[in-house]
Image (spheres, grey):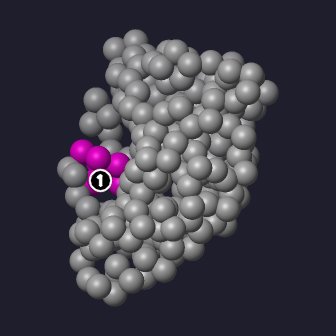
Amino acid sequence: LNTYESCPRQYMYGSVLGLRGRQSRQALAGNVIHSVLEEFLTVFKHTREAKLDGLLAIFEEQFARADFETELERRQHYVDGLAMMKRFYDDDRVRTTEPKELEKWFEFKLEDVKVRGKIDRIDRHGDGRFEVIDYKTGRVESRKAYAEKNLQLPIYTIAMQEGLHMEMKCATIYSLKDGKRITLNYGKDLTHAAIASAKRRILDIAAAVRAGRFDPAPEDWKCNWCEFRMLCPASESPG
């Protein structure tokens, strides 16, 4: 949904036509990292109960069988991933919350629109409320962007309320690259007005997709990094 708001044509190439480019190859490494953490926390329940060697053994096994295109690509992602695992272990073992759900699928309806997705992790706090945690292996946006523009955390909030029926305390973006956490509190940052605005935006996007509106939205900073640049008629004259 964020992709559609940024550029409907990019959304069409990736989500409607199912085309894949370099970002999808990068996403493979991210998927491996997510799968490693899911298996690790399924086996050990909490990082406090495990040794670093246990996490790294899972990491080694999953990276060995991941379908990278070249060994050079595998090695590059391996080095980055290894650093992420060590940082995650150090950070997570001091957390006092309890992981309750991992890679949790959700679905909710807004009028005639079904929204489906998956939450990386849901932790229970001591007061019985829950924290949504989203792992990031790539670029992390600003706190302001996650609070006001990016739809991801508002969608998770709606999912917790209307799909999973779990009382939400906060939502956190956790960068595995540098250990940075951006936490938005329900009610204070993720306000009722923000959630209502997100619902309207979701319905607007759904209506536009159904109407087949996939016009490009060219800008230099987007087009220069777009994995579908060579396909897009607007890429030669952004702006």
The kind of residue tagged 1 is Gly
Confirm whether the magenta stretch covers residue 14: yes
Please indicate, yes or no, whether residue 55 appears anywhere in the rendered image: yes
Q: Position of residue 200 (x, y in %)?
A: 52, 23
The spot of residue 186 in percent (x, y) is 71, 26
Q: Is residue 189 left or right of residue 159?
A: right
Residue at the image point whose x is 29% and y is 85% from the top: 71
Q: Which percent across, then down, holds residue 206?
A: 37, 29
Instruction: Please indicate, yes or no, whether residue 9 appears anywhere in the rendered image.
Output: no
* Label 1: how many Cα within 10 Å (few below 14, some 14–19, many 20+): some
Quickly name the residue at label 1: 14
Quarter assignment of residue 31: bottom left
Q: Is residue 144 above or below residue 212?
A: below
* Quarter assignment of residue 75: bottom left
Q: Residue at x 43, y 76 (%)?
A: 77
The one nearer the camera, 181 or 121, is 121
Q: Is residue 231 above or below residue 91?
A: below
Q: Is residue 82 magenta?
A: no
Classify mark 1: helix, strand or loop.
helix
Residue at 52% over, 15% down: 165
Residue at the spot 42% in from the left edge and 34% down from the top edge: 104
Segment tinted magenta in the rendering: 9-16
